[in-house]
Structures are given as C-alpha cells and as structure tokens.
Image (cartoon, coloured by chain):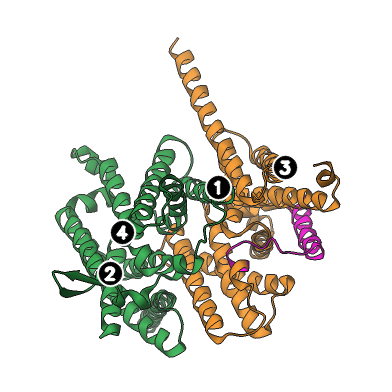
Amino acid sequence: MYELWIVITAALMAVSCALVGSLLILRRMAMLGDAISHSVLLGIVISYLLFETLALPALLLGALLAGLVTAWLSTAISQHSIIQPDASLGLVFIWMFALALVLIALFADHIHLDHHHIVFGEMAFLPFERWQWFGYDLGPRAFWTALVLLILNLSIIVFAFDRLQLTSFAPSFAISLGISATVWHYGLVSLVSITAVAAFDLMGSILVVAFLVIPGATAYLLSQRLKAMLWIASLYAIAAVILGFGLAWWLDTALSAAMAVMSGVLLIITLGILKMRAYIQGYQVNQSKS
Amino acid sequence: MTSLLTNANLLWVIFGTLLIGVSAAAIGGLAVLRARALIGDVLAHAAIPGVMIGVILMGSLSPLLLVTFALMTSLIAYYLIHQLTHRTKLRTDTALAIILASFFALGMLLLSYVQAQHWPNTAGLDRLLFGQAAAITRVELIQLLLLTLVTLVYLWIFFPRLKLVLFNPDYARSLGIHVAREEFIFALVLVLVVVVGMHIVGAILMAGALLIPITVMRIWPLGLGLMLTAAATLAAIAAASSTLLSLFIEQSPTGPWMIVILGIFFILSWLLHLVYQHHNRSRKHV
C-alpha cells in the first residue's frame, strides 16, 4: 500500500512537470527548471534570515518568490538587451545562487543545509505524513498536494490551450490578433516555478529537473501536434516513474534518482528506435530504386 | 593581518583564482558566443557520474584520478550534445537540459548506491560533489593550476585558427583545416577548465565564471579579440577583489564573492549601456 501511494504521488507530480515542461521546450527555455532549482536557495536563505524560522511555509514562500524572480528577471533582461535568453537565465540564477552562498557564509553559518534532502527529496517517507480531517485518515498529505497541483496545471492548459499554442508557435500572429504574447509567456514561466517549487519539496530537485525536460523532449521527437505531444509526454512520465520505482527497488538506491535515470533511458530507447526506423526506410527506398 | 598578507599560501590562492578566472572567462566566452551559454553548467553536472565511477572502480578520492574520470564523462556529454543537436530535431537548449538532467541523475543514482554500500574512504564524497573542496592540498593545487596555464597558452597560440573553426567551420574546412580535430581539442580544453575549476570553486560557480564575464561585455559592440580580452580582464579584477574580500571578511568563501562581483559588473555595464543608448537617441533627434 505504501509503495502504491509513492508511485501514485510521484506519477501525479511527474505528469505536472511533463506538461509544463513540454511548453517550455517549445519556447526554448528548457533550462528554466535547472535554473529555478538553484535560485530557490536565495529565497530560502532570505526568508530564514527575515523570519528566523525553519518552518516550511515561510521557506516555501521564499522559494516560490525566488523562482518567480528568476523567471521574470531573466525574461526582462533578454527582452531589453542584446543578451540571449539562455545567457540571461544563466546570469540570473548563478548570481542568485552565489549571493545565497555569500549570505549563508556571512550570517547563517550555523544552519545546516541538507544537500541530500534538497537533491533527493524524501519520497520514501511521504506516505507517513498523513492528512487528518475530523479524525478521518485521508491519505498522505503529499498526495493531495500533487493532485491539486496537477488539477491546477491541467485546468490552465485545457482552458488556455489555444492561446498557449498560438503564443508558442506564432507569437507575432498572436500579437496581431490582440493576444499578448508577453502576458502568456510570464504566465507560463510563473506556472513552471510554482510547479517546480511544490515538487522540489516532495520529490527533490533531481526529479523535477529531469521531468521538466526529458519526457517533453521525447514527445517532441515523436509528435507533430501539441495535443499529441502533451499526451505522449504524460505517458512517458508515468512509465518512467513506474520503471524507476522498479530500478530503485532492485539496486536499493534513491527513488528520485532512479526515476530520473529511467526517463533518460526511455529517451535513449526512443531515439534508437527512431534511428533504426529511419535507417530501414532509407534502405527500402534504396532497394526500390535499384 | 600583515602575517596573512605575507603568507606564502595566500599568494598561491590569489594566483590560483586569477588563473582560473581568466582562463574560464576566455574559453567560456568562446563557448557562450556559440549560443551555448549554459555549457559550463552542463559539463560541471556531467562530471559527477565520472567522479562516482572513479570512486566505484578505484575506491579512492585522489583529485587527479577523479579529474581524469570526470574529464571522460564530461567529454562524452559534450559529444552527445553535439550529436543531439545535429542529428535530431531537438534544439540546443533542449539538448543541454536533457544531457544535464540525465548525467546528474546518473551521478546521484551512483552516489546513493555508493552511500548504501557503506564503503570505507568515501566519507568526504558529499562535500567534494557539492563544491566545498576547500580541503585541497597545495601540491594538488599546483598540479591543477599547471593544467590551467596550459589552457591559456593554447588559447593564445591557436586563437586565429580557433575563431575560424568555431564560427565559420565551412570556410575553415575549405582552407584545409581538420575541423573535427580542432573542435575536439577545444572541447578537451573547455572540459579541462570546467573540471579543474569545479574542484576549486564549485560546480555552479564555475558555470558563472564561464558565462558572466563575456555576458557583461556582450552588451557592447566590440570585436571578438577585444571582447574576450576585456572579459578576461574583468574576471581577473573580480578574482583578485574576491580573494581580498574573503580575506578581510571572516569565513566568507572566494568563489561566491567572485560571481557576486561579476554580477554587479553586469548591472553597471547594462545601466551604462542604457544611458549611452538614450544619449545617442536624443542626439539623433536633434
């Protein structure tokens, strides 16, 4: 039963990441997940220094603000200067990370930052933190967080599908129709940073960084339409979660790392099959010519 | 204070950060201008599985050994990025993110495997990976710095040819230059700088040292040689002042200070450029 909760929660989170991640890839912002995973440290450190507490809500708020600042500031710099989007993203997140390290060294040398928790998450323990409501046991709290996050992402993507599609593929056409490409761009990067920060706490940064890009990229290779891409990315994410759970079971390693590795393995298999198919097709064409 | 300033170790530290900063700015500048801004970030993460494989196969934490293994996986990552962008329809940023995530995940999988085995001699591993390798000895520092010096000399000598190979490969090929070989040497040197720097200042900060100096200068319309020289000079200033800062303010680390100072340079450069643009525009209207 505990295993089932873990797999279901991880799958919900993975689908959330895969959905917003697919949209990021289309906008050439695939590195945003990695960037936010580093810059949230600044938010955490500042909220610790301001409120002098290690309570989770304060730290999450700080992390969320830092994620939003990363996304907004890097977009603003690249739009108002000659700097490329990826360079401005790197500039912002690396600077925020370095500033966080300086602040820790100066003012908070005594706090213990648990790298292990940040990178791996505490996925194996999430079924034990239950959500009680009038004495009823409603299941793990993480499950409900993941479900709410997925519903949020899904409803925004379903309701705004046309606009997201138009602003991703043809921003100038969208602008000519009176749809603000900028507003949707900022909206999407905000959605990504909300998803990423919520998922960091549950799943660890490694899983988030991997699932924001790898399922989406695999789906991008296979599909011609955005709707198909989103479906395929979700299926790949779920498959990677299940296979990763098996791998972690087999090798006795961290769940999040194993799931992330399996998403990469699925990408390699897909690439192999595509190359093989292209090769066989080319071979058949050559045969029919001769 | 005077005893600190006359300390021989301090000279090495200043010399070391200067060399790392300057070589990272120079070679990183070339990589960044080829639309691979976050290559340093990716290569640094890709070094982690190499370090882990080294630990699993050899069972020791000697820096030179780990640098060798890290070099190998980072080179594989560089090659895979090249292949992904040229052979599939994936764009550069997606390819970079895929390689970063997969290699980092693999590294973390191996790390959790090693930690589950409870082997001896792997206690300092966590600290090594997350960039607090302040415990590096002087002999090792000297070895690593020699590698960096080689990089700078290489860049100095081969700059004209490198410019052609990186930015106009077709023309370079028509001149009879072996482009694939030159490209490999460039990748090797880039990876070397990243891996060596990573052991000294930490992974993410190394990515910053590659990226930020050239980004500061990129705002201004300069030629390639001048731009790289200016970026390297900025990096040198930042390196020297960060070493002094970390000396005057107790317990503050050198690497993060360097990035923070470079970031301030960027803000100044951007503001200056905005003023310059505004000035020019208003003059045109008159």
Task: Output the chain of dot 3.
Answer: B
The amino acid beneath tag 3 is Leu
Confirm or deny contact between disc 2 and disc 4 (CB under 8 A). no
The boundaries of the magenta stretch are B128-157
- Residue situated in front as seen by the camera: B117 or B170: B117
Most foreground residue, B75 or B136 = B136
**What type is the residue that disc 1 sits on?**
Phe
Marks 2 and 4, how far apart in space?
13 Å
The answer to whether residue A257 is magenta is no
Locate residue B56, reporting x and y percent. 62, 83
Secondary element at tag 2: helix
Which of the labelled discs sits on residue A142, or is there none? 2
Q: Check disc 4: other Cα within 10 Å, few if <14, some if 14-19, many if 20+.
A: many
Q: Amino acid at mark 2?
A: Ala
**Closer to us: mark 1 or mark 3?**
1
Disc 1: which residue? A107
Residues at discs 1 and 4 in contact (Cβ within 8 Å): no
Secondary structure of the residue carrying tag 1 is: helix
Image height of B211 relative to B144, above or below: above
* Letter of the chain in orange: B
Residue A240 place in picture, x, y as percent: 34, 78
Q: Return the residue at label 4.
A: A195
